[in-house]
């Protein structure tokens, strides 16, 4: 067995995706699964399609290209505002993109015209988290500037919450989005197909709320980790252990907790205060900051992470000394999942869903 290793249970991911798609459909809300945590991996993309996804989303056009070239033909959404330098590939590999700049949409229109195709857009609205989005009082004027552009279809409006400042979706900010949709339709005489009310942070709000204009969510974390990002609470009915990371012990010794010698900054410009706790059972795992966001690791009982460097994770065991070659398994939060999937040094093992063969 190769380490460090991500174990990915596709059956549990399938369950989580199918559960959310079915439950949110009862609220007339569609789910667009987001594949970016898995870098658009075709195995995960196919699991999501098998679970009922009718559109996939990603923030990187390279990932959408990978999905397309794997033979998956359902519509694809680019969920980061397109860069001007990538518009040709955006038009080629995504059917829809989220936008908040008039100039970008104008250029998308030009490129789509050159490629003799249409491109759908969703205009993003700022609802307080201060990432992307047009300010609410500017949305109508914004739409007026782009509504007649050739080869562009305004499919709807959307918003993103929680990612930057943790602003929660609630009835008030979702009403702002709904009211804007009503206003746009009345002023321009159109019908908006998609009102996209955010990401995994919106799941609990959507499951509990009554009907609104919001009819779409873009969901990654809740599908893969079974929790919502605002308070990292588990979502009832979902698996929270679909993904785990295992690393191998490469050193195990009894060592003092207090370093000696003259101290400066460490390799990462840090100088932490270290209390003297006597001697402890210390082990080192072959895993480091080059591989993973260490703060996103959730340790098993009896284990404590004390520090990390580029390629060493230092832990203490309160139960018994760990053995050389022993494997230690962690669960992950979203930041750890993102970084570990991006690491070429972490092996990825996909456990196939029952009855559905995987490579």
Image (cartoon, grey):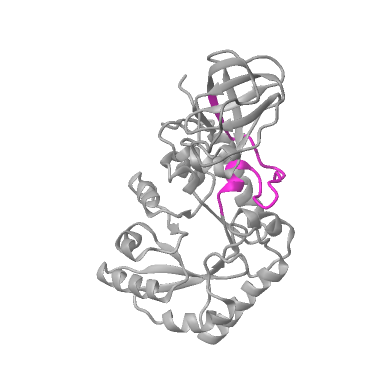
Let me know if residue 200 appears in the view. yes
Q: Tell me what residue is drawn at x 70 percent, y 50 percent.
A: 231
Q: Quadrant of residue 217?
A: bottom right
**Residue 268 percent coordinates (x, y):** 50, 40
Q: Residue furthest bottom?
A: 187
In this view, which residue lies farthest toward the front?
262
Q: Image point 65% across, 38% down: which residue? A: 239
Q: Residue at x 42, y 76 (%)?
A: 102
Q: In the picture shown, does residue 3 fall above or below 108?
A: above
The vertical placement of 168 against 260, above or below, is below
Q: Quadrant of residue 42?
A: top left
Q: Which residues are magenta?
A: 219-247
- Counting from the top left corner in percent of width and height, residue 143 is at 48, 80
Does the magenta stretch mainly form a helix, a strand or a loop? Answer: loop
Front residue (pair 346, 17):
346
Count of numbered badges drawn on the protein = 0
Q: Is residue 17 visible?
A: no
When the figure is inspected, residue 19 is found, relative to residue 124, above or below; the finding is above
Closer to the camera, 166 or 218? 166
């Amino acid at each position: 067995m190769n380490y460090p290793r991500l174990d990915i249970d596709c059956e549990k991911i399938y369950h989580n995706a199918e559960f959310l798609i079915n439950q949110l459909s009862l609220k007339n809300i569609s789910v667009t699964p987001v594949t970016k945590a898995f870098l658009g991996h075709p195995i995960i993309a196919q699991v999501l399609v098998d679970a009922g996804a009718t559109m996939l989303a990603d923030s990187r056009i390279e990932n959408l290209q990978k999905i397309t070239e794997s033979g998956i033909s359902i519509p694809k959404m680019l969920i980061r505002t397109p860069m001007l330098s990538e518009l040709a590939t955006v038009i080629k590999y995504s059917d829809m993109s989220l936008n908040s700049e008039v100039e970008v949409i104008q250029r998308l229109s030009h490129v789509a015209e050159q490629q003799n195709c249409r491109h759908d857009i969703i205009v993003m609205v700022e609802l307080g988290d201060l990432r992307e989005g047009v300010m609410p009082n500017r949305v109508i004027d914004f739409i007026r500037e782009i509504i007649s552009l050739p080869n562009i279809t305004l499919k709807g409006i959307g918003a993103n919450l929680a990612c930057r400042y943790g602003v929660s979706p609630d009835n008030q900010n979702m009403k702002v989005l709904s009211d804007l949709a009503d206003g746009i339709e009345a002023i321009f005489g159109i019908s908006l197909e998609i009102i996209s009310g955010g990401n995994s942070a919106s799941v609990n709000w959507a499951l509990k709320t009554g009907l609104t204009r919001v009819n779409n969510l873009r969901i990654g974390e809740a599908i893969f980790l079974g929790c919502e990002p605002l308070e990292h609470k588990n979502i009832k009915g979902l698996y929270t252990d679909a993904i785990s990371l295992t690393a191998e012990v490469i050193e195990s010794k009894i060592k003092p907790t207090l370093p000696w010698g003259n101290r400066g900054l460490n390799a990462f410009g840090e100088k932490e205060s270290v209390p003297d706790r006597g001697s402890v059972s210390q082990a080192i795992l072959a895993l480091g900051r080059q591989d993973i966001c260490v703060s996103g690791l959730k340790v098993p009982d009896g284990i404590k992470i004390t520090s990390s460097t580029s390629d060493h994770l230092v832990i203490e065991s309160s139960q018994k000394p760990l053995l050389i070659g022993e494997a230690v398994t962690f669960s992950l939060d979203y930041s750890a999942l993102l970084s570990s999937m991006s690491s070429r040094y972490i092996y990825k093992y996909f456990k196939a869903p029952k009855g559905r063969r995987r490579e």
